[in-house]
Image (cartoon, helix red, strand yellow):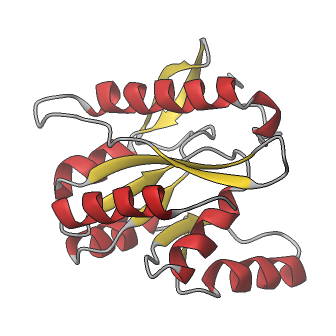
Amino acid sequence: FVDLTPSLEKISRVSHAYEGRVIYVTAHLGNWEYFGSIMGIKGYPFTVIGRAINNPYIDRLVTQSREMFGSRLVDKEGAMMSLARELKAGRPVGLLPDQKSNDRTSTKLDFLGHKAGTTLGVAKLAKRFQAAILPVAVVMRDDGLYSLIVDDPLVYTDDESEETIMQRINDHLGSTIKTYPTQWFWMHNRWKQ
């Protein structure tokens, strides 16, 4: 890694300004799993959604690695209630909304130039708890080291629709993916109709 100080200072400022109510958003890009480890090691653990991996041995290893430094993993079934409790208590959460969503809270929004099922969960949580939406990414540099990128919080207003907020998130994720296209790791059909 390179110097994490500027990124962690920004996270600290945002966390303080929003009394811990922060939603980290990233894509399946670079070493997204490493973000949880970094944050836990540096004293900023958070809760993240995941689903059980089909192979129980691999699932146990992945779960242990995610929770090793204090971050918490909740199953995607019923996750919104768990995330709501975390934000209400002033604890941050992390979400990767670059995947296709078919649930009742999704809608078709533009993602990398095509309509894609997009969850509205991040926007719903942010509005309900007045949480910061903080884009982050852990990307590999040309020299093989990783950089932690922490952008400015995505600004939204109470009167904006969840669709508008999620489109802003999709646009931001899309821009990051275009900057690091070889590091986007999503093998499922994001635009399946």
Residue 72 showing in the rendered view: no
Image position of 68 with respect to 152: above or below: below
Image position of 48 with respect to 176: above or below: below
Q: Residue 28: x and y, percent?
A: 68, 47
Q: Residue at x 61, y 84 (%)?
A: 67
Q: Is residue 85 left or right of residue 18?
A: right
Name the quadrant of the N terminus.
bottom right
Residue 26 showing in the rendered view: yes
Image position of 119 with respect to 79: above or below: above
Q: Is residue 135 left or right of residue 87?
A: right
Q: Residue 186: x and y, percent?
A: 77, 41
Residue, far top: 113
Q: Is residue 65 left or right of residue 4?
A: right
Q: Residue at x 45, y 82 (%)?
A: 43
As rendered, which of 174 and 39 lies closer to the eye? 39
Q: How many marks?
A: 0
Q: Residue at x 84, y 69 (%)?
A: 54
Q: Residue 79: x and y, percent?
A: 45, 66
Q: Residue 44: x and y, percent?
A: 43, 76
Q: Residue at x 65, y 88 (%)?
A: 68
Residue, far left: 159
As rendered, which of 6 and 105 lies closer to the eye? 6
Name the quadrant of the C terminus.
top right
As rendered, which of 181 and 10 lies closer to the eye? 10
Q: Is residue 100 left or right of residue 104?
A: right
